[in-house]
Image (cartoon, rainbow, N blue to C red):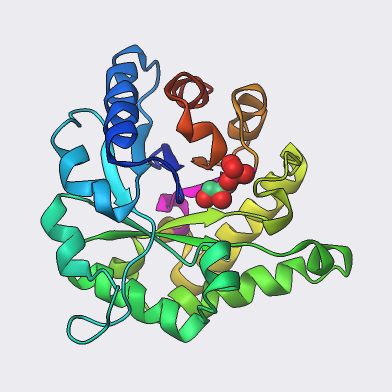
Amino acid sequence: MRQKIVAGNWKMNTDLDSGIALAKAVNDSASSKTTDAIMIIAPPSTHLSEIQKVLTDVKMSTQNCASEEKGAFTGEVSVDMIKSTGAEYVIIGHSERREYFNEDSATLAKKVDLCLSRSLRPIFCIGEVLSERESNEHFNVVFSQLSDGLFHLSEDELKNIVVAYEPVWAIGTGVTASSDQAQEMHAFIRLKIAENYGKEVADSISILYGGSCKPDNAKELFANQDVDGGLIGGASLKAEDFIQIVNAF
Ligand code: 13P
C-alpha cells in the first residue's frame, strides 16, 4: 500500500515564536487524526531545530536545499545542515523556486541526488502553468519535469521520492483543479513512472496534489485512486484547517 501523506508548506510565513506555536498546535491536533496519513510540516529553515523539539507525531521537511554540498555559497542551506536538524523531507522544485529563482531541471536533479545521498526524502514538485494547459501542453510539460528531474535515478532511489503535482494556476489562487483533472494527471504521472520503472514501483510512489487544497475540497480530491494526499500552502497555516484536510481521507 502507498503511504498517504499530507504536507504543509508554510512558505515564507511565521516568525520563530509564531512558527513554534503553530508547530505545537499541529502536533497536538495529530492526536485527533482519524487516518494513517503521515503529517509533515515544512517551516522556514530558521525555525527547524526549535520546531523539531516540539514535534512527536508530525514529521519535518524543508522547503528547499542547496545544490552544492558545502563551501562558499552565501545564504544557502546544505543537505547536511538540514539533516542535522532532524528534518526527513525536502521540497524540491516548487514552482515558486522554478519561477522566481530560475531553478532549472539540471539543478533540481542535483538537489534530488544530494538529498538521497543523505537519506532525505525529496518531495519533488511538478506542474504546468495556465497557458500550457490552455494550449494542451500540460502533459508534455509535466512529463519533461518528471523525467528530467527523476528518471536518472535507480529503482531503489526512486522509491524514496514523493511526487507532488501542483498545477501552477491553482497555487494560491483559490482555483482548485477539479477532481477529474487531478486524477487524470496523477494517473498519467503514475503511468510514466510505470513505463520506466515497472508497475510495482509506480504503484508504490505517493503522488500528492497541491494547489488551493482546503478542508472543503480535500475529501473529493483524496477520494481519487491516484491522489495519495496533498501539499498544502495557505491552509497549512491554521492547525484546525490542516488537521481537517488530513482527516479528509
Ligand atoms: P496553496 O495551498 O496556498 O494554493 O499552495 C499550494 C502550494 O504551493 C503548496 O506547495
State left or right for residue 103 relative to residue 44: right
The reply to whether residue 230 is visible in this rendering is: yes
Q: Residue at x 34, y 39 (%)?
A: 40
Front one among 107 and 187: 107
State left or right for residue 155 relative to residue 207: left
Q: Residue at x 43, y 76 (%)?
A: 108
The quarter of the picture where residue 142 lies is bottom right
Q: Is residue 167 magenta?
A: no
Front one among 73 and 105: 73
Q: Residue at x 62, y 52 (%)?
A: 186
Q: Quadrant of the N terminus?
A: top left
Q: Is residue 206 magenta?
A: yes
Front one among 37 and 70: 70
The quarter of the picture where residue 133 lies is bottom right
- Residue most toward the top? 32
Up the image or down, 86 lies above or below 228; here it is below
Find the magenta span and give its range. 202-211
Up the image or down, 120 lies above or below 29; here it is below
The count of marks equals: 0
Front one among 69 and 189: 69
Up the image or down, 89 lies above or below 142; here it is above
x, y percent for residue 195? 55, 70
The quarter of the picture where residue 161 lies is bottom left
Q: Residue at x 13, y 35 (%)?
A: 53
The reply to whether residue 226 is visible in this rendering is: no
